[in-house]
Structures are given as structure tokens and as C-alpha cells.
Image: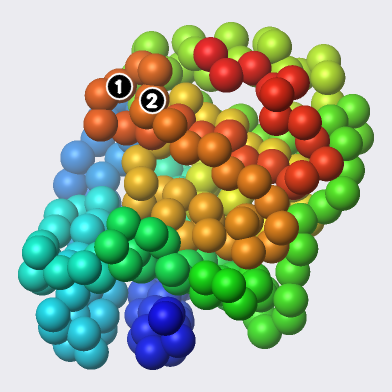
Amino acid sequence: MAEPFIKTAIHAARSAGALLRENFGQELEVNEMQDHDIKLELDVRSQDLIAKILLEEHPDHAFFGEEGIEGDQDSPYQWIVDPIDGTVNYFYSIPHFCVSIGLRHQGEIILGVIYDPLLDELYQAEKGHGAQMNGRPIQVSQRGLKDAVITIGFSKDKASIDAGLERYKQIAYSVRKTRVFGSAALALAYIAAGRLDAYIEEQISLWDIAAGWLLIEEAGGIVEVRDSPVEIGKQAIIAANRTIDLSGVPRD
């Protein structure tokens, strides 16, 4: 079902990635400086570029991005886009960020593309066709909890930070190491590729996780998404390989 759209998604991701690569380390225009987040003019420019490519090719589709919506919102097809996942990293010239593009059909994610422009790593998945990184098949790891490297996300307000810190205390002693990278989409891609073993966050947006959600499932892993316990309209996520027993991972 996703095959007619994958080339368009890859083209959009690579085009936006080129824009981000060209501007990385340069002086950036800030649209909004928040306590725990930054909104860049480049976020908007990257999303505009992605939307233009996707909707020119598929004008009857809906577009749902971090910077707003476009297209036919009644369409059964909806693109879900984060134009810079890891904006704070990007602003501080930390080389860990990506472009994330997912596609839903009638509520089911059928395509995911995540592109890291600095490493030139492109992750892609189509429903029922497995996951790849730069054209090579990828799979989740088989490490158990005590051998796992787990990444825990901390969101943008006190309630979610407190919840994340509590989760960190509950899980840190049970695993080999914990990491905090600042890009949810790349965390999910790394699990799909077997680099990481699990990811947990109490408050996350759909555009952060849509593409990576499918990547992990197509790479043999498990993703649990539910309503966030700390903010209405957001999600909470636990994603892992199939060796880790998610029943032993604290939820709240």
C-alpha cells in the first residue's frame, strides 16, 4: 500500500536534510525561546519544503506537522512530519538531529522515513516489508534488560520532567546504561537498528514518533503508545526489542 509514496517521502526527507546540513553551525533565527525548547525559523522553512514536495506529488493528502497542517484534512492519507527532530541539539550545534516523515492510511501508519543528514543515514519502513537503513535490512537487538542500553526522554514542563526523573530512578539500576540524546525519532531508529534496546518517554507528540513507531515494528520490536499521564493530547511511549519483558518496565 505504501509503495507509491516511499520515493516521495525519501525525496522530501533528503531535501529537508540538505537544507539542515547547509545551515548547521550557522547563526540561526529564533522564532520563540521557551524555558525547555526552542522554535527556529528553520523549523518552518524545513516543514514548508517537505509539505511542498509531498503535496505537489499527492495533492489530495492531508499534512500534519509540528509547525501546522495543510492539505485535505478529510483525506484517508495523512503525512505526519517533524521537520527538525532535535531542534535544541541543532541550535547548540550538537550533531544529533533528523527529519521524520510518517504516513497514515485510515489511522494506520503504513510508511516511515527518518533521515540523519550529518551521518547520511536514511531509515525507511513500509508496512509488511521490513525496515532498512541505507538500503540494508535492520533488526532490533536480542539483548535482555540487564544488558540493555535504554534511552529516556524528558519533555518540556515540570510535570513531565518529574515523571521522567521518577521513571529514570525506577529503571536505571536494572540496565547496563541509560542515555539521553534529545531526538525521539533517532532513538526509535537506533532501536530498530539494534544500537539501543528501549526508549521511554512520558510526554511526546505524534510527529516525533510516527515514523520510528513503524520502523521498530518492522524491525521486529514492540511499541506501546498510550495517552500521556501528564498532558492531555500528548502520548506516552515505551518501545523495545522483543527480548526485554515490557511487563517489567515501569509505566507510571
Q: Position of residue 27 (x, y in %)?
A: 33, 58
Mark 1 vs mark 2, CA separation in Å: 6 Å
- Check disc 1: other Cα within 10 Å, few if <14, some if 14-19, many if 20+: some
Mark 2: few/some/many CA within 10 Å (<14, 14-19, 20+): some
What's the amino acid at mark 2?
Answer: Ser
State the mark number for residue 200: none
Q: What residue is disc 1 on?
A: 231
Q: Secondary structure at mark 1?
A: loop
SS of the residue under disc 2:
loop
Q: x and y percent of residue 154 in the render?
A: 50, 27
Q: Mark 2 highlights which residue?
A: 228
Instruction: Say if mark 1 contacts mark 2, CB within 8 Å.
Output: yes
Image point 52% across, 74% down: which residue? 126
Residue at the spot x=77%, y=45% of the render? Answer: 242
Residue 195 lies left or right of residue 100; in this view the side is right
Say above or below: 232 vs 180: above
Quadrant housing residue 1: bottom left
Q: Nearer the viewer, residue 25 or 120?
A: 120
**Up-down relation of residue 101 to residue 241 (above or below):** below
Tell me residue 157's x, y (percent). 34, 19
In percent of width and height, residue 236 lies at 45, 30
Q: Is residue 94 left or right of residue 229?
A: right
Q: Is residue 105 above or below residue 86?
A: below
Viewer-side residue, 73 vs 95: 73
Q: Amino acid at mark 1?
A: Glu
* Mark count: 2
Whether residue 84 is visible to the viewer of this picture, yes or no, is no
